[in-house]
Amino acid sequence: MSTPLIRPSQTHPLRHVAIIMDGNNRWATQRGLSGAAGHEVGAERVRDVLDACQKHDIDVLTLFAFSSENWKRPEVEVRALMSLLASYLKKEVKQLKERGVRLRVIGRRDHFSNRLKKLIADTEAATEKGEQTLVLALDYGGRWDITESARELSRQVQSGRLRPEDITEELMQQQISLSDLPAPDLCIRTAGEQRVSNFLLWQMAYTEFYFADCYWPDFDGAAFDGAIREYQRRQRRFGMRDAQVVGAEKESA
């Protein structure tokens, strides 16, 4: 018998979940399969998690699909990942539209082939009217994201549109990836690893973390439900004391 979900906090609803999908290669190795096979099964789990997000009324799902450091992996694995990405986009665009899911890609694109860049842009355009958002972080790194934001602000200073003393966290936030979306409330990482790996460093200043022991290809809807239950047991304080949070929740009830 499954454990019932706890009623979400009215003060801090769960709107945005970010996932570091880890363990595809280790999952495949344990089964005597190629690394590419592990990534293929891992891609199938995206559907399960999207289903779970819709069930829990989660507006945004961000997946760390390919980091800026992943280019260091063996060339054959990188080629397989690029091929899998292209296949996923071509195969899933119709389903994403039917589900009402908007695809958005963050990260650099200049390292991708022209064909892949066009496929990404076409899929984003085809799904732009979706109400739920699926974000794929591709060739993405949190340090790169912050650096790009700083560069843009420095250009504004150089052009005379902005004074250095006018730079605030809010202005920096406006330049950062996903600035128009709520910050991640929960970040899930699979495969038992407990680190952030240069993912959404600015955006996850107050994100709750959940570390799952299973590899990503085994992380299905039921595993996602377990992560949500754990999140809903927590109290998000954002620097406040327990009593202040309780008081705020009573006021909003």
Image: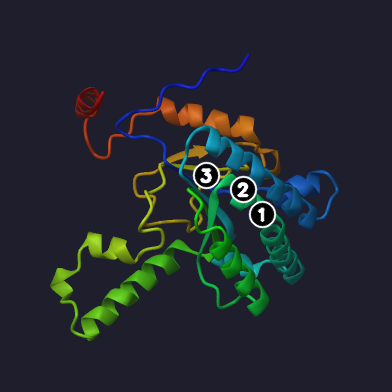
Q: Are marks 2 and 3 in contact (CB under 8 Å)?
A: no
Estimate the x, y position of residue 117 in percent, counting from the top left: 60, 73
Please identify the residue farthest to the bottom as the structure is shown. Answer: 159
Quadrant of residue 179 within the rendered picture: bottom left
Estimate the x, y position of residue 169 in percent, counting from the top left: 24, 60
Residue at the spot x=51%, y=64% of the render?
140
Residue at the spot x=67%, y=66% of the render?
73
- Residue 31's place in the image compared with 105, above or below, is above
Most foreground residue, 179 or 99:
99
Left/right of residue 244 with respect to residue 92 in the rendered view = left
Q: Which of the colour schemes (rainbow, by chain, secondary structure, one colour) is used?
A: rainbow
According to the picture, the residue beneath numbered tag 1 turns out to be 94
Q: Amino acid at mark 3?
A: Gln
Q: Amino acid at mark 2?
A: Glu
Most foreground residue, 226 or 77:
226
According to the picture, the residue beneath numbered tag 2 turns out to be 98
- Residue 149's place in the image compared with 84, above or below, is below
Q: Are marks 1 and 2 in contact (CB under 8 Å)?
A: yes
Left/right of residue 10 with respect to residue 55 in the rendered view = left
Q: Compute the Cα span from label 2 to label 3.
A: 35 Å
Q: Amino acid at mark 1?
A: Lys
Estimate the x, y position of residue 67 in percent, counting from the top left: 56, 62
Viewer-side label of 2, 3: 2
The N terminus appears in which quarter of the rendering? top right
According to the picture, the residue beneath numbered tag 3 turns out to be 194
Residue at the spot x=72%, y=57% of the render?
91
Among numbered discs 3 and 1, the one appearing first in the sequence: 1
The C terminus appears in which quarter of the rendering? top left
Estimate the x, y position of residue 29 in percent, counting from the top left: 79, 49
- Residue 33's place in the image compared with 185, above or below, is below
Among numbered discs 2 and 3, the one appearing first in the sequence: 2
